[in-house]
Amino acid sequence: MERQVILNSKHFELTINRLCYQLIENHNDFSETVLIGLQPRGINVVTRLKERLEEILQKEVVCGNLDITFYRDDFRRRETPLIPSATNIDFVIENKKVVLIDDVLYTGRTIRAGLDALLAFGRPKKVELLTMIDRRFKRDLPISADYVGKTVDTLISERVSVEWDELEGEDKVVLFTPDANG
Amino acid sequence: MDSLSVDHLIGIKDLTTNDIELIFKTADAFKQVINRPIKKVPSLRDITIANLFFENSTRTRLSFELAEKRLSADTVNFSAASSSVKKGETLIDTVNNILSMKVDMVVMRHPNPGAAKFLSERINATVINAGDGTHEHPTQALLDAYSIRERLGEVKGKKVVIVGDILHSRVALSNIFCLQKLGAEVMVCGPTTLVPRYIHELGVKVEHNLQRALEWCDVANMLRIQLERQEIKYFPSLREYSMQYGLNKEILDNLSKEIVVMHPGPINRGVEITSDVADSVQSIILPQVENGVAIRMAAIYLLASKIKRE
């Protein structure tokens, strides 16, 4: 497996910054907006954005996380059951603008499930999608992101991983490519 | 990731401690779901479940049915009172006929011990035992232990006394297995006639004095006297049973510590437990019912994930 860093820690920070300012452009002071991260890895993106946004805005930004396990379409097509993580949405999303957040957008199936899961909490005024990495050309469903950290063109055999300082020791995005012989 | 070690839920005896913990963990997530504005998830859209009740039930049947519906499964219900069983059809024939209608899972309550195991060995569907005679009632034991864990933080190291008709109780047997697997100490308490002679071989303490049992325990699970299963008299009168083994507010208030009171239902108010105890803050009878739905959703969800389509 060949490893290639496609976003180093410096660019990573710049990207997070840019995403924050893009969000502020559309959502002003966030009084009508909530950020919802998709379990498990979208949570890290939310945590980082929240930190930076609160620094810039000097006010609290409402955030939650959403587990989509029970809404997935590949239940029982896997070998082992899908074990859920926690959902933590202790605010009303009725008539709010919701920004769904995940680390990698690939087939779009996770986001489809996320939209379904979100509806169990009410009817948001608007839903937008933010993703750190957009693996374009590999979508199974008609879904696109409103805010993108970085767009990458990848093969199905490749894997993209967003790594975090608090989990893996460094902020970076890595592209894994299988060796030519295997 | 984990999955259950069994394909059917016949009894707690067959489960590993890991299985029980996996069910609890999954139930935590479902408990969140059933407290949302929309209490339904689409996970089991393509699963059909038959609820076969060859014996009366209110709570368990409703609880299973709600659990199934909140997982978006299709359900069919059957109760023996209004069926062809009365015309002489055998269990296997009844069930095979229902399975011909393409059912993936069977939830069954039956008056004969071993009926669920018998069925699971002979049909091509997942079987969940909702009580087989005096043998086991696994989902009840799971929800009881889950409720103890919710109230006291953990089950391990807790002392639980099961009071009443141990002899006829499937709840008692399943509870003993479940609590022991989770590391709790178990005692049974009741009149000599209603405590099986060799029950101590399961590693439980036996006590015939309610006061002493209550002083020992952290949790008291009060069972109902199952008059429908008693062909002979096991005690002189309900009044006498109630005087010796009934839990009332006075006994509870005179204990040196505050204990948790449970009851699997249906309650015979004034027999095994008085109204003021059943409705007190120490009682977790209604939380038990709420947890029942979450536990059953978890068990059905985890078992359904093992059903493979060709």
Image: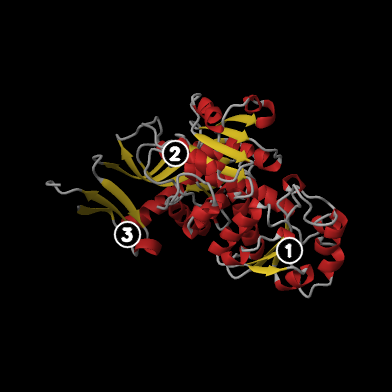
Labels 1 and 2 share a subunit? no
For the residue labelled by badge 2, is the local secondary structure a helix, a strand or a loop?
helix
Residue B80, relative to residue B265: is it above or below? Answer: above
Nearest-to-viewer mark from 1 and 3: 1
Please give the chain letter of the residue carrying mark 2. Answer: A
Residue under circle 1?
B192
- Is residue B270 left or right of B304 when viewed as pictured? right
Please give the chain letter of the residue carrying mark 3. Answer: A
Residue B184 in view in this figure: no
Labels 3 and 2 share a subunit? yes
Residue under circle 3?
A9
Labels 1 and 3 share a subunit? no
Could you say where residue B34 lies in the image, as x and y percent from the top left? Answer: 63, 44
Give the distance between the C-alpha atoms of the residues marked 3 and 2, in whole angstroms. 26 Å
Q: Residue furthest front?
A: B232
Task: Give the quadrant of residue A74.
Answer: top left
Q: Residue at x 32, y 51 (%)?
A: A161
Q: In the rendered structure, which disc, 3 or 2, sits on the residue that comes first in sequence? A: 3
- Is residue A91 left or right of A68 when viewed as pictured? right
Disc number placed over residue A111 in the picture, else none? 2
Could you say where residue A88 lies in the image, as x and y percent from the top left? Answer: 56, 51
Q: Is disc 3 in contact with disc 2, using a CB cutoff of under 8 Å?
A: no
- Is residue B211 left or right of B120 when viewed as pictured? right
| Mark 3 nearby-residue class (10 Å; few <14, some 14–19, many ≥20) | some
Residue B57, relative to residue B252: is it above or below? Answer: above
